[in-house]
Structures are given as C-alpha cells and as structure tokens.
Image: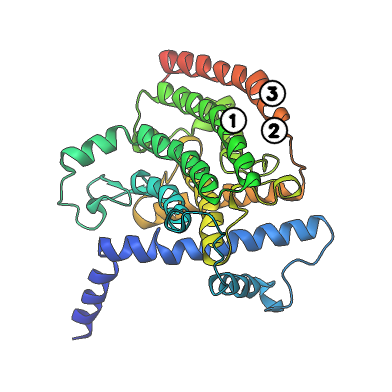
Amino acid sequence: MIGNLLSLIRFYFFYPSFFVVIIFPGLLFTGILLLTTIWFERKAAARVQMRVGPYYASKKLGGYLQLIADALKFVFSEVIIPAGVNETLFVIAPILLLLVSILPFAVIPVSVIPQSGSVFSIYYHDFYDPNVGYGVLAGIFTCYNLLLILALESIYPIFVIFLAWVTNNRFAIVGAVRETFLSVSYDALILIATLSVAIEYHTLDLAVIVQKGIPGVIVNPIAAFIFIVGMLIGSSRFPFDIVEAETELVIGPYTEYSGFLFVLTMAGSYVGNFIYSLVFADLFLGGWYPFSGLPGAAFMTFKAVLLLFFSVFLRSVYGRYRIDQALRGSWKYLFPLSLISLITGTLVGYLWL
C-alpha cells in the first residue's frame, strides 16, 4: 500500500508538465534562485562597502527573510498605470519580457540519462521515459540547440525596447536606445566566442561539447573571457549597468513600472543572466561531466549559480561605465580579441579535436 502510494507520488512529482512548471526550472526554483541572488548581491555589497544590508528580519539567517518580505510588499503594492498609455500593452509588456527570458531554459541540456545516454533537457521526455524517442523536431533542436539558444536570447532586447516604448517616458526611451547600442555589441561578442568553441568541437550541440570531457576554458580561454564580458553586458551587470543607470535615467526602461509588474521586469534580467551562466557552464566548464542524471544536473546548476553570484558581486567592486566607454571597449578592444579567439578555435579544431 505504502509502496504504491510512493510510486504514485513519484510519478506525478516527476511528470513533465508538473516538474518543469513548478519544480525545475519552474516557479519554485526560479523564485528561490531570484531571492537568493538578490540577497547575496545586497549582502556582498554591504560587506564590501562596510554597511549592514538585509539584517533585521531573521538575523540568524543573515536577513534572508527580508527578501521575502520585500517580495510580498512589491506583489501586493498598487500597480500604477500612467495616463496616456495603452493599458493593455503596458500590462502585457513585462509578462512578455519575462516569458522571452525564460524560453531558452527549454533547450539547454543539463545532464544525460545513465542507461540510454539520452540528453536530459527541460523539454525532453527522455528524462522521464528513456524509451521515448526524440522525434524529428526534437532531433533538430538537439543538433542545433546552441544556435537556438543564442537566437532566443537575441530576442530579449527587442522586448526591453518594446517595454520602454509603451510607457511613453523619456527616461525609458533613452534607456531603450542604450539597450539597442549595447545589444549590437554584445551579441557579436557572444556569437563569435560561441562559434570559436563550436569550431573546436565540430558541433553545435551543447551535449556533444560537454561529453568530449575537455572544458572549453582550457582549449580556448580567450573565448571564455569574451563570453563572460558579453554576458555581463547582455544582462546589465556592473560595470555595464548602463541601460538602468539610476543616477541618470531613474531606472531606464522600467521607470514607470510598480508593484508586481516591476517584479516581472527585474526578474527578466536575473533570469537572462542565469541562462547565460548555464550556457557558459556547458561550453567552458564541462557542464555535468563526469556525472549523469540528477547528480549531473545538480552539478551543472551549481556551477551556473556560482557564476551568477560572481556576476552580481561585481556591483560591489566596480563603478558604472559610460555608454561611450562601453561601446568603445567592445568594438576597439574586445571585438579584435574575439577574432583572435575565432582563429584560435579554428587552429585547435583543425589540429587537435
């Protein structure tokens, strides 16, 4: 009786439509990750700058519950819609922004199944039933998942611009223009760095790259550096917090948003940063190798979370670049360096791998 009950609970707990939506990378995991990341960002900045940070709520937990209190405050705060805007578009824009930021989760491989060797990714049913085949569509996504991830990530800036446009706010529009300039520069860097590694491993499948057993940071450290810088620019982490520069633009494209809609707009930035961290873990840190199954997925997620924490820690030790400094550095220094990484990847791919 108990065994049947446990089997039933296990079946429904790991059922794809429940596990993906609620557990990983669903609402529960995403909510906890966002709260923990923001808590770490605030505590790290407070420690470096000799302040207290979140403290009074749950002192023994380092003030972690303060983040939950702040989240509840935002969720139940009044949503103010400015006069003269399209109310429907104003409300839908943050939802679309968060949705687009989450989409790449669906095609990032995070482990393999020990018995079948099939790839465990969020949308694959193979993790739950190894006897189910990939099918034509899943096979296409598998072979070219790296390109699909980059394509989905490149859509995100469009919705940031759309978010700013529907608010009809001059500070938001200036932030959107900055996002346009930066997106052109960091997309080129990330694409070339990724292509350098793909040439080395002769594949556009992240799972195949991981299963080679040689981390990309060893065979092409220049591409790893370029990717990290592009990731920081793309997710507006310091010192590239230029789009949201509060001392100049209030908070850029998100200026007019309040309450729960503001939570959605800020969540998109952190989720996008985590997406880049997962891709970096696969490309340059060996992914789940040498583990498999759930331990492999946990190992890879741990690497990505460490990189995410490193990204938000930079707020504590760096000032903000000006837009002209960021663009000059991107095209004058980082772009030629990315071409060197491409040449390196071509030589390594031809001579070694």
Pointer 2 or 1: first along the chain: 1
Q: State how many labels appear.
A: 3
Where 68 sits versus 131, above or below? Answer: below
Return the x and y of residue 145 as percentages of the image width and height. 34, 36
**Label 3 environment density (alpha carbons within 10 Å; few <14, some 14–19, many ≥20):** some
**Rendered image: mark on residue 193:** none
The residue at 35%/38% (across/down) is 207
| Placement of 295 over or under 156, stated as above or below | below
- Residue 172 appears left or right of 126: right
Residue at 23% across, 58% down: 128
The single residue placed furthest to the front in the displayed view is 84
Residue at 28% from the left image edge and 33% from the top image edge: 143
Q: Quadrant of the N terminus?
A: bottom left
The reply to whether discs 3 and 2 touch (Cβ–Cβ < 8 Å) is no
Element carrying mark 3: helix
Place of residue 166 in the rendered image (x, y in percent of width and height, measured from the top left)? 50, 49
- For residue 181, the mark is 1
Tag 1: residue type?
Phe
Residue 67 vs residue 129: left or right?
A: right
The quadrant in which the C terminus is found is: top left
Hey, what amino acid is under mark 3? Arg
**Of the residues under marks 1 and 3, which one precedes in the sequence?**
1
* Residues at circles 2 and 1 in contact by the CB criterion of under 8 Å: yes
Determine which quarter of the picture holds residue 324: top right
Q: Quadrant of residue 341?
A: top right
Disc 3 marks which residue? Answer: 328
Apparent side of residue 3 relative to residue 165 in the rendered image (left or right):
left
| Label placed on residue 323 | 2
